[in-house]
Image (spheres, rainbow, N blue to C red):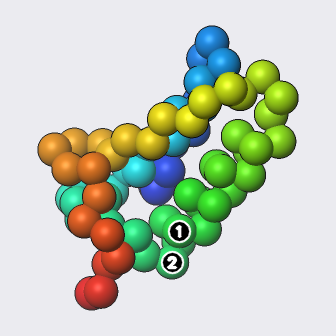
Amino acid sequence: MVLVNYSVAEGVAHIELNRPAAANAFDLPTAREFADAVRRAEADETVRAVLVTGAGKRFSAGGDVA
């Protein structure tokens, strides 16, 4: 399962948290994939903005303490 989706369109990097069943809460694997996506956006000279969203009804519940 992909925990963080990444795409670029028209100079905008879209980073989407993809754990809707867990309210997109960050666990260690999600944090690692999120960091990788941020690094990809940083390294791409065509990216002029970054949009962070969450799949499903919630953006993010924060840290996954479970």
Q: Position of residue 19 (x, y in %)?
A: 33, 57
Residue 8 visible to an observer of this rendering: no
Is 9 positioned to the left or the right of 64 in the image? Answer: right
Outermost residue toward the bottom in this view: 66
Residue 48 image-quadrant placement? top right
Task: Classify 10 Å Cα crowding around label 2: few (below 14), some (14-19), many (20 and above).
Answer: few
Q: Position of residue 50 (x, y in %)?
A: 57, 36
The residue under label 1 is 31
CB-based contact (under 8 Å), mark 2 and mark 1: yes
Residue 6 visible to an observer of this rendering: yes
Residue drawn at x 78%, y 22% as measured from the top left: 46
Say which amino acid is labelled 1. Ala
Residue drawn at x 53%, y 68% as measured from the top left: 31
Measure the alpha-carbon separation of dots 2 and 1.
5 Å
Q: Position of residue 5 (x, y in %)?
A: 51, 42
Numbered-mark total: 2
Is 11 positioned to the left or the right of 63 in the image? Answer: right
In the picture shown, does residue 5 fall above or below 21? Answer: above
Outermost residue toward the top in this view: 10
The residue under label 2 is 28
Where disc 2 sits, the SS reads helix
Residue drawn at x 68%, y 56% as measured from the top left: 36
